[in-house]
Amino acid sequence: RKNSIAFFEYKLLEKASNSFSDSNVLGEGGFGRVYKARLDDDKHVAVKKLDCASQDAVREFENEVNLLSKMQHPNIISLLGYSINCETRFIVYELMQNGSLETQLHGPSRGSALTWHMRMKIALDTARGLEYLHEHCNPSVIHRDLKSSNILLNANFNAKLSDFGLAVTDGSQNKSNVKLSGTLGYVAPEYLLDGKLTDKSDVYAFGVVLLELLLGRKPVEKLAPAQCQSIVTWAMPQLTDRSKLPKIVDPAIKDTMDMKHLYQVAAVAVLCVQPEPSYRP
Ligand code: ACK
């Protein structure tokens, strides 16, 4: 499959470059915009365009292309090609006409389009995609940033996992040394607090997605600035000494609400260090 992936020449994408206008924006990713583009054969595709390539963006680009080019599964987004021209990099994917699960659940239509049956199917598709990463890829892959905005829906509302910029392969590196990455609300507590990364971290995030599908709410509602400030004031002194981190979450605390609260407090404090949706302290 790797050999069959077309290397999209810049010229080819240049022809489609009139597609890179505001009216064709599908959405905004961490490192660039995603556009709907039409290629020569009239095929519609999605193109992620990375303009100013920061080191992190280039690393995520290479990681995503490298991993996705080896994968083929109905519940994993198809990589159609990529292109590098000076500072501009493109990744070409199959077009997912119904956007992300996040937009479907929390966008203007507020989830009304998703029936119970569709939600069950999306949950099953997501589980199948994860099972493929964990059980059938060799070496196995941990996604590390599973969330509703990275679950995309095609015209038939089949769900596929996307955004493999932060994914890691088992054994490729010392996983505990990999920079802490993920998204507030989806990160497993043991990973956030102890840096313990396993495929179960994805399973935790999948649990959060299931709750989203069930309740129709985002995992973490936005906190008012005053609330955020008081939480951080409370949490910061406890977080400065990293050796105390595991003790903040006491294994004796079985109550999930308490666990969730403590974990969110820690996450908010970490986010303050670098206020990005995906944080890398
Ligand atoms: O929720 P959305 O409309 O769907 O906003 C996000 C945004 O780009 C950032 O990821 C959309 N997006 C990403 N990849 C694709 C794709 N292959 N097909 C359609 N939309 C996509 C996504």
Image (cartoon, rainbow, N blue to C red):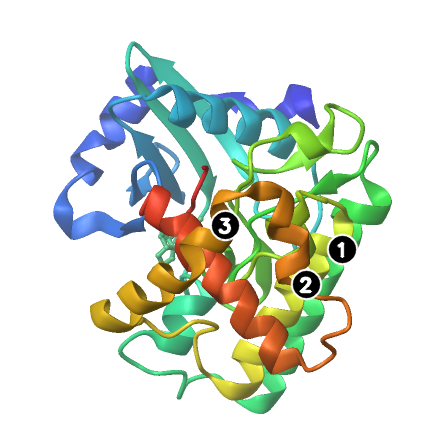
Q: Which sits in the foreground, 281 or 149?
A: 281
Q: Is residue 42 visible?
A: no
Q: Secondary structure at mark 3?
A: helix
**Mark 2 residue crowding within 10 angstroms, few (<14) / some (14–19) / many (20+):** some
Q: Where does the C terminus fall, quadrant-wise?
A: top left
Q: Where does the N terminus fall, quadrant-wise?
A: top right
What distance separates the C-alpha of mark 3 from that of mark 2?
A: 23 Å
- Give the mark, 3 or 1, whose residue is nearer the N terminus: 1
Amino acid type at mark 1: Lys
What distance separates the C-alpha of mark 3 from that of mark 1?
A: 24 Å
Quadrant of residue 175 in the image?
top right
Q: From the image, tell me which residue sits under label 1.
A: 200
Label of residue 204 in the image: 2
Q: Is residue 50 visible?
A: yes
What distance separates the C-alpha of mark 2 from that of mark 1?
A: 6 Å
Instruction: Pinpoint residue 246: horizontal percent, then vertical percent.
Output: 67, 53
Q: Which sits in the foreground, 98 or 181?
A: 181
**Mark 1 residue crowding within 10 angstroms, few (<14) / some (14–19) / many (20+):** some
Q: Residue at x 48, y 29 (%)?
A: 60
* Marks 3 and 2 in Cβ contact (< 8 Å): no
Q: From the image, tell me which residue sits under label 3.
A: 239
Amino acid type at mark 2: Tyr
Q: Secondary structure at mark 1?
A: helix
Residue 91 versus residue 193 in the image, above or below:
above
Label of residue 5 in the image: none
- Give the mark, 3 or 2, whose residue is nearer the N terminus: 2
Q: Residue at x 66, y 19 (%)?
A: 3
Instruction: Pinpoint residue 255: horizontal percent, then vertical percent.
Output: 68, 82
Q: Is mark 2 within 8 Å of ligand 1?
A: no
Q: Secondary structure at mark 2?
A: helix
Q: Locate residue 34 relative to residue 178 in the image: left or right.
A: left
